[in-house]
Image: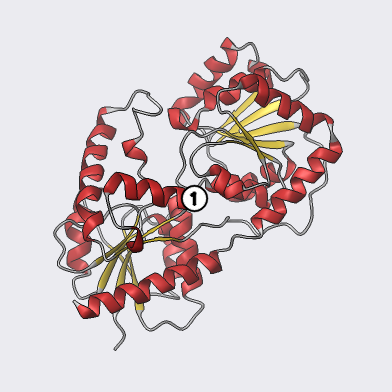
Amino acid sequence: MKPKIAVDARYGLRSPRRGVGEYVHQVLVQLARQENPYDLILYGDQSSNPKTVEFFRTIYPVHILNAPNFFLWEQWIWPQAAKKAKILHGTANIGPLRASIPQILTVHDVIEWHRGRDFPGEIPFRHHVSRFYRMNALKYLAPRALRIMTVSEHAKADLIQTLGVSSDRVHVTPLAGKYAVLDEVPPYPTKEGSYILVLGALDPRKNLVSALKAFARVRDRAVTLKVVGVEPQGVGKIKAMAQSLGMVQRVEIRTMVSDDELKRLYQNAAAFLYLSRYEGFGLPLLEAMSQGCPVIFARDSSLPEVACQSGIPVDADDAQSIAQHLEQLLADRDLRHAQSLKSLERARQFSWQHTAALTHKVYLKALKEAGGR
């Protein structure tokens, strides 16, 4: 009988999915395409999308566990349901503190140690409670985990420094995009006219304020800024920011859009502006590149590692320099085409098949170690 690995698949069973969910979803799909000496069992909660669950049940056993909150799900319901597994895989920076079963952790970043220090901002009380729980749980779990996976060399170094784990137990399994990489640069300009694309959030880490200040300096008034993925409660605040900069008519603000719509927005944008102050990986940057979009990104954390020489790195707070780069891309068709080609070439170096292959190797090492225990 094959050993069983119990996977926290909550985020991968949702729709729509963000970064962690896309990682879980895609790796599970790819692992099912090979013969493995272990069986994966997936566990989700009430937030699971029924169609996504139905899809995965054609591949794996899937158990949807009910719990009144995420804390009880993680610390009691899931480990009890998975107590016959050989290993637990906590895919989202967390795992059960008192489980007797050995664990693998995927730690995407240690952002909570930076939040409030490196990018200060108001943190709601509910978030304070969640941070206290997750930070202290991770400090306890990380030194005890059989193996830890993370998503970039930057995240690995930060994790080792922050949590004091040994480097030989931390494995980098880079992410990939949700879209197939285009074969060629998409046509430009489009019927929609020229626009710069930003993924918006009020989290100070995402640094939307710098993006707005930079765009306010772009002299071509026919160009618009599309801010997509904004929390509904944040739309009014972002409009107020745009109003204060005298460009409310040039900024289009949208909440979450479908994957297909976001794909089209990447393909048709003159540039994707990503000025985040901290990312464990920076998946939107890679997804924009996969659609041939020129990218301008902050030279902070993992973003230069992801883009490499294929984008335009900037100081996240230098609005004048960022605006100049935007104007150059808008005015110079040849430059824009060259940057699009660089984006596609770099994006082709990432794949979920590779992520899954690296994950498989970690599983084998952990199973061997668990057997020794």
Answer whether residue 185 is visible to the viewer in this image. Answer: yes
In the image, is 184 to the left or to the right of 323? Answer: right
- Compared with 77, 39 (above or below) is below
- Is residue 241 or residue 218 the one in the foreground? 218
Residue at x 43%, y 68% (from the top left corner): 359
Residue 10 in the image: state x and y as whole percent: 35, 57
Q: How is the image coloured?
A: secondary structure
In the image, is 295 to the left or to the right of 139? Answer: right
- Compared with 96, 337 (above or below) is above
Residue at x 60%, y 22% (from the top left corner): 318
- Compared with 228, 337 (above or below) is below
Residue matched to label 1: 16
Residue 309 in the image: state x and y as whole percent: 67, 46
Q: How many marks?
A: 1
Answer whether residue 40 is visible to the viewer in this image. Answer: no
Image quarter where the N terminus lies is: bottom left
Residue 70 in the image: state x and y as whole percent: 25, 49
Q: Give SS at disc 1.
A: loop
Residue 166 in the image: state x and y as whole percent: 30, 58
Q: Say what amino acid the circle numbered 1 marks.
A: Pro
In the image, is 220 to the left or to the right of 136? Answer: right
Circle 1 residues within 10 Å: few <14, some 14–19, many ≥20: some
- Compared with 365, 284 (above or below) is above
Image quarter where the C terminus lies is: bottom left
Using the rendered view, name the quadrant where residue 205 is placed.
top left
Residue at x 40%, y 52% (from the top left corner): 156
- Is residue 112 or residue 47 the one in the foreground? 112
Q: Point out the residue furthest to the bottom here.
A: 1
Residue at x 60%, y 12% (from the top left corner): 245
